[in-house]
Amino acid sequence: MSGNVQALLQQALQAHQQGLLDAAAAGYEQVLALAPRQFDALHLLGVIARQRGDAQGAVTLIRAALQVDPAQARAHCNLGAALQDLGEPQAALDSYDQAVRLDPRYALAWDNRGNTLRRLGRPQDALYSYEQALGLRHDAPEAWCHRAIVLNDLGRFDDAAASAGRALQVRPAYPDALLALGNALQALERLDEARAAYERALALAPRAEVWCARGSALKKAGDLARALDSYERALALDPAYALALHYRANTLRALGRKDEAIAAYRQALALGANPTEVGFALAALGEGEMPASAPPDYIKGLFDQYAGHFDRHLVEVLAYRTPALLDDLLRAHLTATQDEVLDLGCGTGLCAPFLRPLARRLTGVDLSQRMLDKARETGRYDTLACADIGDFLALEARAGRYGLVLAADVFVYFGDLAPVFGQVARTLRTGGWFAFSVEALGEENSKGGNGYAITPSNRFAHAVDYVEGLAAAHGFTPVETRHAALRREHGRDVAGHLVVLRRG
């Protein structure tokens, strides 16, 4: 009987290798009828179950095989893949861990383990796993591609582009690697190259995700009509694609098609788009209650994405000069060095060169850790804290600690400034300085009479009399207010106010 089992198993294996799944499955079942605990037949029948889309059947069969021989790394790896299909990433990770314990040179298991770690929100661990896979198989295009995806997640866009390029050297017609390359290039503001990468991917496989990414690159480049077309092509392939609906709504809003934008936002919301972000966008269109501030997750995501090229984008593209303008204003009034200076929303540290000479000790706080990593590289801060500004100020233990608090281009993410004015007043010493910028509230954005409004760029603008009223209410003495162009956007100057107050 043993010889018959081996012959049947060999025939089933040959059919399986030829892609004849029905014949292979019938052969494995014949083996199991004669030898119910035959490891290979149980394991490979489980593999066929997964190939047919039956992940639960695959798990049951492969687990049965592992009860016969638990020392088979390939079976643990295949079990992990089936568990991942079932949406059980932690159980899948356990299986991949067991596979690499049994066979540390199993490159596929390391690669799959990285995919699971990425889905579990552990990008650094995933990167390590991909690099283990590549150390074993340096020419594996899948591992290079997956490494590119996680490097994008980590904000390492230059490295991501290089990794995707390595995948494409091995496999030029690789849509996932082209998508990863396009995403890296888009984050690096190399928008024409990003679009070209997406279009190469679409020529190979017209997927909704890629159309959506192409739309994003076109919108950033200011080509709103083609961006809208890309989002609509994505939705033609996947009508329930909430992100594409959200981005389509953003584009309609930018085109001035308000009613269509509102309808698109509501449709996106119904399909599961981020309710806070969509609610914020609807409020900017006059639909719904005006929020007190931009959603923290929106701010964090925005700046995490731009950390790698934030300074260059601001200076070269937006002609951003608020830090220098505030420095010029401060130096007209502040003559003594301050013991403690606080840079609210410090970002990558653009204000640090101006603040460092004014401070014996300089503290920066920002919501984006990736921004703070860049700020740390300047070497100009004594302390950096990753926190929401309001939370940081509320938890500041020492009242009257700081001699100067600066907020450059920060209050564009706050509508109601009363809470932060109160918190700054508490943390400033008597006679301490408070310097900041706000965007100017124009007549076209003066809805509701709050003294602030959301502009089409999703930023808040404030009226001077609103700022002056808050200053008086919180014990500040006005020192000087200057009107200035803070940056350029879509070829036009953005008007703002630079304000210096002093705590009485």
Image (cartoon, rainbow, N blue to C red):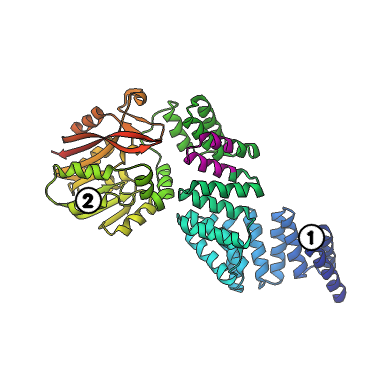
User: Looking at the rendering, which quadrant does residue 56 occupy?
Assistant: bottom right
Work out whether residue 122 can be spotted: no
Q: Is residue 219 magenta?
A: yes
Residue drawn where x is 38% and y is 53% of the image: 369
Q: Residue 306, how many percent across, how many down?
A: 41, 48
Task: Decide if residue 377 is on the left or right side of residue 470.
Answer: right
Work out whether residue 448 can be spotted: yes
The boundaries of the magenta stretch are 211-231
361 over 478 or under it: above or below? below
Element marked by disc 1 = loop
Circle 2: residue type: Leu
Number of numbered callouts drawn? 2
Q: Nearer the viewer, residue 369 or 487?
A: 487
Circle 1: residue type: Gly
Q: Quadrant of the N terminus?
A: bottom right
Residue drawn where x is 64% and y is 65% of the image: 77
242 over 444 or under it: above or below? below
Q: Residue 207, how many percent across, how many down?
A: 63, 45
Q: Residues within 10 Å of mark 1 (few under 14, many from 20)?
A: few
Residue drawn where x is 63% and y is 39% of the image: 238
Q: Residue 17, how many percent across, how many down?
A: 78, 64
Please give the residue where the numbered disc 2 appears in the rendered image.
355
Give me the disc on residue 19: 1
Q: Residue 256, how many percent across, how many down?
A: 47, 27
Q: CA distance from mark 2 to mark 1?
A: 67 Å
Q: Is residue 267 magenta?
A: no
